[in-house]
């Protein structure tokens, strides 16, 4: 007997980006002129920040503003109720990097090949859709990045669906001092700038729906915090080399507001999968965890600077 929402294949969708998109993304997550390879198109080399593809499901091929609610509306899934896209928040993201993406798709065609892994009924608090998206060169078939995400539909549960499998935990070793502590002071305009990458959810700019969802007003994109943490890990452990990052994952534990200081604590475990070291991290605001279950596989740089 099939489980509602399990392994539903979705039509591939074309995606594209320009050098300008990579520059905006890097600037929006706090990368500065000390990292020219991500922020200056004439750098040698000029490279894409590795987590950039996480914005592509929102942007697709557009260079203009798009209607977030319309784009977030799901196709009908047999056995699963229709969810309201105005009551969604991001639950977490895991990325696996197979090869570096080019700095522009001009003259090439890329697409996201996607499937819904499962739809899980969490009762009164809501439902979760877990999906997988793979960034692929449409002509060669080469895979570049795999993204597994959890979208939480608040207050939209109790439809007698499957509860879902237990989640794997990657706890940070809080009993030890972190190897690195990376601080990033966000600005009041941080969400307004980050949304220009292509994620135009009104939750991050207007008073509604943040108030109706219990947040008291607009909050930062979860993926903003996620990408800021990726910047911290790559800079502290991987020497700003995008090829050094093989896997990166985290769970969104609490909302962040524009103007908050993000404090990312990073631990190197000394355990390796091939050349890649197991790294754990957590991000805090005012001593409270906002990004948990953080794990990365990183090829350590010859020299990693304390921050």
Image: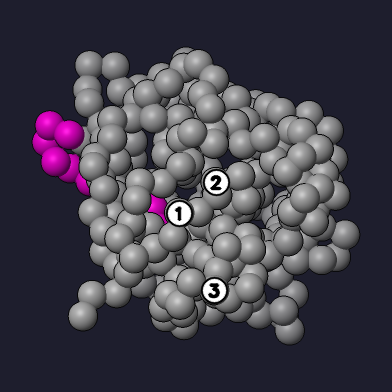
Q: Would you call the spot at circle 1 few (<14 residues within 10 Å), some (14-19), or many (20 or more)? A: few
* x then y, percent, for residue 52: 47, 38
Query: Which residues are drawn in magenta?
Result: 138-149
Mark 1 vs mark 3: which is more N-terminal? Answer: 1
- The residue under the point 64% across, 63% down is 155
Secondary structure of the residue carrying tag 2 is: helix
* x then y, percent, for residue 90: 57, 54
On the question of residue 238 being in view, the answer is yes
Mark 3 vs mark 2: which is more N-terminal? Answer: 2
For this view, does 190 lie left or right of residue 225? right
For this view, does 82 lie left or right of residue 102? right
In-front residue for pair 307/63: 63
The CA span between labels 2 and 1 is 9 Å
For this view, does 237 lie left or right of residue 125? left
In-front residue for pair 180/73: 73
- The residue under the point 83% across, 33% down is 188
User: Is 76 a magenta residue?
Assistant: no
Tag 2 and tag 1, C-beta contact below 8 Å = no
Residue marked by disc 1: 82
Tag 1 and tag 3, C-beta contact below 8 Å = no
The CA span between labels 3 and 2 is 17 Å
**Mark on residue 158?**
3
Residue 254's quadrant in the figure? Answer: bottom right
Tag 3 and tag 2, C-beta contact below 8 Å = no
**Mark on residue 85?**
2
Q: Would you call the spot at circle 3 few (<14 residues within 10 Å), some (14-19), or many (20 or more)? A: few
């Amino acid at each position: 007997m099939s489980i509602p929402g399990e392994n539903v294949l979705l039509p591939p969708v074309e995606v594209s980006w320009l050098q300008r998109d990579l520059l905006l993304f890097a600037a929006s997550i706090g990368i500065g002129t000390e990292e020219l390879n991500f922020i200056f198109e004439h750098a040698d080399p000029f490279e894409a920040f590795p987590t950039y593809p996480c914005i592509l499901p929102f942007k697709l091929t557009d260079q203009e503003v798009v209607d977030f609610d319309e784009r977030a509306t799901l196709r009908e899934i047999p056995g699963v109720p229709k969810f309201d896209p105005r009551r969604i928040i991001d639950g977490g993201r895991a990325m696996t990097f197979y090869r570096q993406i080019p700095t522009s798709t001009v003259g090439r065609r890329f697409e996201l090949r996607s499937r819904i892994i499962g739809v899980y009924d969490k009762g009164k608090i809501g439902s979760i859709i877990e999906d997988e998206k793979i960034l692929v060169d449409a002509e060669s078939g080469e895979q570049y990045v795999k993204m597994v995400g959890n979208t939480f539909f608040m207050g939209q549960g109790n439809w007698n669906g499957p509860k879902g499998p237990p989640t794997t935990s990657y706890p940070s070793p809080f009993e030890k001092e972190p190897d690195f502590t990376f601080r990033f002071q966000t600005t009041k305009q941080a969400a307004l700038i980050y949304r220009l990458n292509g994620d135009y959810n009104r939750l991050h700019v207007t008073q509604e729906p943040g108030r109706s969802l219990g947040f008291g007003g607009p909050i930062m994109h979860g993926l903003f915090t996620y990408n800021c943490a990726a910047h911290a890990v790559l800079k502290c452990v991987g020497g700003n080399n995008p090829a050094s990052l093989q896997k990166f994952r985290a769970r969104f534990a609490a909302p962040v507001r524009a103007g908050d200081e993000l404090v990312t604590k990073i631990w190197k475990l000394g355990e390796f999968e091939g050349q890649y070291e197991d790294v754990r991290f957590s991000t805090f605001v005012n001593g409270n965890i906002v990004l948990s279950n953080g794990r990365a596989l990183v090829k350590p740089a010859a020299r990693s600077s304390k921050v």
